[in-house]
Image (spheres, rainbow, N blue to C red):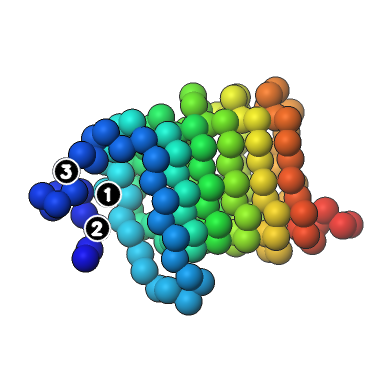
Amino acid sequence: MKWTPTRPEWTGIEETEGLALNLQRSDNMNFNTEAFRNMKRLKLLQLKYVQLTGNCDRFPKKLSWLCWRGFFPQVIRNEFLNETYLVSIDLRYSNLVRVWEDSRRLGNLEILNLSHSHYLTQSPGFSQLPYLRYLILKDCKFARD
């Protein structure tokens, strides 16, 4: 079944506070960010090897915990980052080369896990993250230099 926000069998989307979608690395499935449009209460999102297409402004605005294993893009675009509520970002096994363009939007971030992100070449700037408590860079190549 294709996951779209307009299908009648997906009632209750507005009330959803947590969502987990786990795929295998070999799965080549894309989901459109439009599916998040009506998830106004989504706070916890766990994605495993999921590729999203579409406009980043459709991403949940009240998200506080994001776990996205196998994050596909090479950099997190500013439009994607939630500046108000995001407290934890877990992007293990990502394809990131650079983490973000501007960390000032993540003033409440406490946990950042980039473990096993083998393509990461630059450490993100941390001076704009006053509440960062846990930074996990296990098995990152640049961390060994």
Q: Residues within 10 Å of mark 3 (few under 14, many from 20)?
A: few
- The kind of secondary structure element at disc 2 is loop
Name the one closer to the observer, 92 or 102. 92
Name the one closer to the observer, 101 or 38. 38
- Amino acid type at mark 3: Thr
Q: Position of residue 43 (x, y in %)?
A: 42, 34
Q: Quadrant of the C terminus?
A: bottom right
In whole angstroms, how far apart are the C-alphas of marks 1 and 3?
Answer: 12 Å
Q: Residue at x 76, y 58 (%)?
A: 140
- Amino acid type at mark 1: Ala
In whole angstroms, how far apart are the C-alphas of marks 1 and 2?
Answer: 7 Å
- The kind of secondary structure element at disc 1 is helix
**Badge 2 is on which residue?**
3
- The kind of secondary structure element at disc 3 is loop
Q: Residue at x 24, y 40 (%)?
A: 13
Q: Earlier in the sequence, mark 3 or mark 2?
A: 2
- Vertical relation: 143 (above or below) 118: above
Which of the 4 image quarters holds residue 14?
A: top left
Number of the label disc, if any, that sits on residue 35: 1
Q: Earlier in the sequence, mark 1 or mark 2?
A: 2
Q: Position of residue 127 (x, y in %)?
A: 74, 28
Number of the label disc, if any, that sits on residue 11: 3
